[in-house]
Amino acid sequence: MDADLVLFLALFAFAIAIAGATAFVIFWPLTLVHLRDRHPQLVAQLGPGAFLKPTALWWLLRGGYRATPDRSLSGLATPSRVSLLVILGGIAMGGVLWIVGKGLS
């Protein structure tokens, strides 16, 4: 495989990660506002300033919101989780492809 093609695919993977970040900054704040308004016990668990807090992000990644029987919370947190997974996957794929592309050139 040509090194230029691999590096293009790496750039494309990073673009996918940026698209995931765009969705994340839309849905995650909405999820946090919903938590603040309707689930103060979860806000106490996640702590203040939970937007980029590792414990809150881990709670989102492992699907901790599913333990709460609130369909609105699930409707907001699921796209947040998917977008966070897209960010992580895009960065990982882009990094691997970049390393492979540099090795080919």
Image (spheres, grey):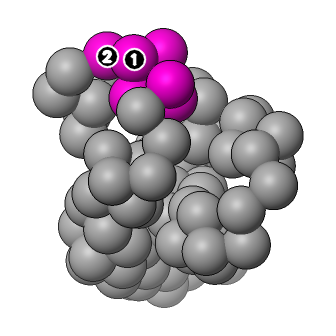
Q: Residues within 10 Å of mark 2 (few under 14, many from 20)?
A: few
Determine which of the numbered discs, if any, sits on residue 47 in the image. 2
Residue depicted at x 45% and y 52%: 38
Which residue is the extreme one toward the left?
49
Start and end of the magenta stretch? 41-47
Q: Nearer the viewer, residue 39 or 32?
A: 39
Q: Quadrant of the N terminus?
A: bottom right
Q: Are marks 2 and 1 in contact (CB under 8 Å)?
A: yes
Please give the residue where the numbered disc 1 appears in the rendered image.
Answer: 44
Which is closer to the viewer, label 2 or label 1? Answer: 1
Point out residue 61 in the picture as x, y percentages from the top left corner.
64, 40
Q: Is residue 42 magenta?
A: yes
Q: Secondary structure at mark 1?
A: helix
Q: Residues within 10 Å of mark 1 (few under 14, many from 20)?
A: few
* Residue type, mark 2 in image: Gly
Residue depicted at x 51% and y 29%: 42
Point out residue 13 in the picture as x, y percentages from the top left corner.
46, 72
